[in-house]
Image: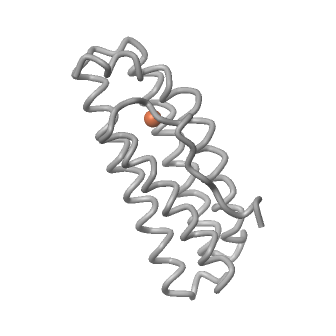
């Protein structure tokens, strides 16, 4: 189902390979999570929990990379951008906790990830793209 998957489009490119590759990996991991939701939907599902944990970890590594480059080019909107990352991480960790406590479904987490990722890349990440052009 289209709704339960996410596709990379070259329109999402920020014109900087390291970041584009990481964004593609995040897209791949979100799809893995959608796949995992089809297989199992309880927090007792080891494979599913592993997928969720590695997606969260990878997102954090990716944010660190982005912030490092933005800092390097003195990107003026770095504080606001960083704030978006921080808010995202706490929202996701809260969602993971709720899932572990049986209060929510993993598909809700996958859909949130998809929406956030696409909006963030197409909106906020695109804004720093011109600044990385000189690197
Ligand atoms: Fe970002």
Residue at the image position 31 percent from the left and 19 percent from the top: 133
x and y percentages locating residue 69 in the rendered image = 27, 29
Using the rendered view, name the quadrant where residue 72 is placed.
Answer: top left
50 vs 40: above or below: above
Q: Position of residue 12 (x, y in %)?
A: 53, 36
In which of the image's four quarters is ligand 1 placed? top left
* Vertical arrangement, residue 124 with respect to residue 32, above or below: above
126 horizontally vs 82: left or right: right
Q: Residue at x 66, y 70 (%)?
A: 106
User: In what quadrant of the picture does the C terminus appear?
Assistant: top left
> With 29 as the anchor, is 132 left or right in this view?
left
Q: Position of residue 43 (x, y in %)?
A: 59, 81
Question: Where, by quadrant of the figure, is residue 78 drawn?
Answer: top left
- At x 61% / y 44%, what residue is drawn? 116
Horizontal side of 85 relative to 9 (left or right) equals left
Q: Where does residue 91 sit, x and y in percent of width and height?
A: 58, 49
Please name the residue shown 57% across and 44% down the image: 9
Count of numbered circles in the view: 0
The quadrant of the image that shows the N terminus is: bottom right
Q: How is the image coloured?
A: one colour
């Amino acid at each position: 189902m289209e709704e339960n998957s996410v596709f990379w489009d070259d329109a999402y490119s920020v014109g900087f390979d390291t970041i584009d590759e990481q964004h593609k990996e995040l897209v791949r991991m979100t799809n893995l999570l959608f796949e995992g939701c089809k297989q199992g939907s309880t927090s007792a599902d080891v494979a599913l929990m592993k997928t969720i944990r590695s997606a969260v970890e990878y997102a954090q590594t990716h944010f660190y990379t982005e912030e490092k480059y933005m800092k390097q080019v003195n990107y003026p909107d770095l504080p606001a951008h960083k704030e978006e990352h921080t808010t995202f991480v706490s929202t996701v960790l809260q969602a993971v906790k709720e899932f572990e406590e049986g209060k929510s479904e993993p598909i809700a987490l996958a859909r949130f990830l998809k929406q956030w990722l696409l909006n963030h890349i197409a909106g906020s990440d695109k804004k720093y793209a011109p600044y990385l052009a000189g690197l």
